[in-house]
């Protein structure tokens, strides 16, 4: 199955923003600063399409601290005694570490009503954090070289010798290729194959003749796919590949028959952070159907709020698989060492 969509971003984003502005303020009217940490790459469209509506609705000023998830975690550790950030958006495996270290305050439905509308698989540890969106990951392809990817087994096809790009396991999306390899080697479903990565490495070693490159820098690797030097790119996600496709790049994103994966995008409240009530209100607005509609349109992601609207023509793959991030964190260093041995 290939995801296709049309560009109606500005109109839909504007409509969703208007819905936000129509809501009454639920925080005291005077402007207050709320420091929100998140990925640097999201700053542009968040500041243009998402934050202004929330700021006017709540009477606050969002101060966005953009960096990588691991850097935000280090800031939370360093500021534990007196946190500067109130809300943080991070990848799920980093959220797991923050929760394990007591840096995250559990959210409640009483304080964050929209939490009750988030699908159960997107709420972790009874409200420690929630996924505000789910970019889905499958296999990207050069549309001049392929019309889709029916099965992950095509990555191993002799027809694709020297034409496959694979993410490094140092990247979050690198996990999906290893998990797919375990599934193909054992026949186990993803929920069981994730605990048998030795089989995954065995299968992965047979992929090497097809590998053009293993990347840590995703945009650079994408250039190889768009130029046609590569035909397939494993572990790719909707919030990048489909944006490039909508901009006219000769790429597509396939959801193979075995299923797709949920790229982690979580939001949490910092334990002991300033302006707790304001943080709850911001998270509630961020999890609202109105904001999720903006994210769907702007980022080609799946919403997690069950009341969110899916645009016409937006193909929704089967519910994406969410791994056991605790297991990933426990084993990742050893897996990376093995990866370097097998794929080096």
Image (tube, grey):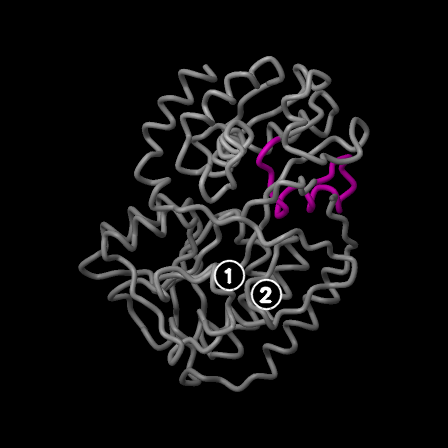
- Secondary structure of the residue carrying tag 2 is helix
Which residue lies at the image location 61% right of the left edge and 60% below the top edge?
295
Q: Is residue 248 magenta?
A: yes
Query: Residue 132 has which mark?
Result: 1
Q: Looking at the picture, how far across and down is residue 113, in whole percent?
A: 45, 78
Percent coordinates x, y for residue 207 in the rendering: 57, 19
The N terminus is located in which quarter?
top right
Name above or below for residue 310 compared with residue 7: below
Is 261 positioned to the left or the right of 282 in the image? right
333 part of magenta stretch:
no
Are dots 2 and 1 in contact, CB under 8 Å? yes
Label 1: how many Cα within 10 Å (few below 14, some 14–19, many 20+) = many
Upstream in sequence: badge 2 or badge 1:
1
Q: Could you say which disc has been placed on residue 292 in the image?
A: 2
Rounded to the nearest whole Å, what is the CA distance between mark 2 and mark 1? 7 Å
The boundaries of the magenta stretch are 234-253
Depth check, front residue: 13 or 344: 344
Residue at 44% of width from left, 51% of height from top? 66
């Amino acid at each position: 199955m290939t995801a296709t969509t049309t560009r109606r971003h500005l109109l839909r984003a504007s409509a969703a923003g208007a819905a936000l502005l129509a809501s009454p303020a639920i925080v005291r009217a005077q402007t207050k600063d709320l420091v929100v940490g998140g990925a640097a790459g999201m700053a542009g469209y968040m500041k243009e399409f998402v934050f202004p509506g929330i700021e006017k609705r709540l009477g606050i000023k969002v101060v966005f601290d953009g960096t990588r998830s691991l850097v935000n975690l280090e800031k939370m550790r360093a500021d534990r005694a007196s946190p500067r950030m109130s809300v943080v958006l991070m990848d799920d495996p980093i959220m797991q570490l923050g929760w394990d270290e007591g840096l995250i305050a559990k959210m409640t439905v009483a304080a964050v009503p929209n939490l009750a509308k988030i699908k159960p698989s997107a709420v972790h540890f009874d409200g420690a954090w929630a996924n505000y969106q789910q970019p889905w990951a499958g296999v990207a392809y050069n549309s001049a070289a392929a019309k889709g990817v029916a099965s992950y087994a095509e990555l191993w096809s002799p027809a694709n010798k020297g034409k496959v790009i694979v993410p490094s396991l140092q990247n979050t999306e690198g996990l999906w290729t290893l998990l797919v390899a375990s599934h193909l080697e054992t026949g186990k479903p993803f929920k069981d194959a994730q605990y048998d990565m030795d089989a995954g490495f065995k299968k992965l070693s047979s992929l090497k003749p097809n590998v053009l490159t293993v990347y840590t820098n995703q945009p650079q690797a994408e250039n190889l796919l768009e130029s046609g030097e590569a035909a397939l790119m494993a572990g790719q996600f909707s919030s990048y590949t489909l944006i490039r496709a909508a901009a006219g790049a000769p790429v597509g994103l396939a959801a193979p028959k075995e299923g797709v994966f949920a790229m982690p995008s979580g939001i949490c409240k910092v334990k002991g952070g300033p302006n707790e009530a304001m943080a709850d209100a911001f998270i509630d607005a961020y999890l609202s159907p109105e904001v999720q509609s903006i994210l769907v349109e702007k980022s080609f992601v799946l919403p997690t709020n069950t009341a969110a609207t899916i645009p016409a023509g937006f193909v929704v793959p089967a519910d994406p698989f969410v791994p056991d991030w605790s297991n990933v964190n426990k084993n990742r260093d050893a897996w990376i060492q093995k990866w370097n041995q097998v794929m080096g």
